[in-house]
Amino acid sequence: MPTITSYFGFLLAASTITPALLIGLSKIRLIRNELFIQFIENEDLCEVPDIL
């Protein structure tokens, strides 16, 4: 009987951790992409014109 309980406990833990991990990684990726886009936009605004 403990085998069945531990099996279902493992399934419960795995089914809880996996979506949380995927959501966390996607949020990190979104934040990183937003920062990268802001960096590119700011870089375009701060270009020094060529005088020569």
Image (spheres, rainbow, N blue to C red):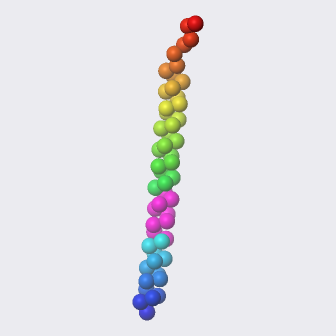
44 up-or-down from 11: above or below: above
Residue at image x 45%, y 66%? Answer: 17
Which quarter of the figure has residue 2?
bottom left
Residue 27 image point, x, y percent: 48, 50
**Which quadrant would the C terminus be assigned to in this image?**
top right
Horizontally, residue 24 falls left or right of residue 50, namely: left
Residue 50 image point, x, y percent: 56, 11
6 up-or-down from 20: above or below: below
Residue 48 image point, x, y percent: 51, 16
Residue at image x 51%, y 48%? Answer: 29
Q: Residue furthest front?
A: 52
Q: Residue furthest left?
A: 2
Residue at image x 54%, y 24%? Answer: 44
* Count of numbered circles on the image: 0
Instruction: Look at the image and give the residue range highlighted in magenta.
Output: 15-23
**Which quadrant would the N terminus be assigned to in this image?**
bottom left
User: Magenta stretch containing residue 18, yes or no?
Assistant: yes
Q: Residue furthest bottom?
A: 1
Residue 16 image point, x, y percent: 45, 69
44 up-or-down from 37: above or below: above
* Magenta stretch: dominant secondary structure: helix
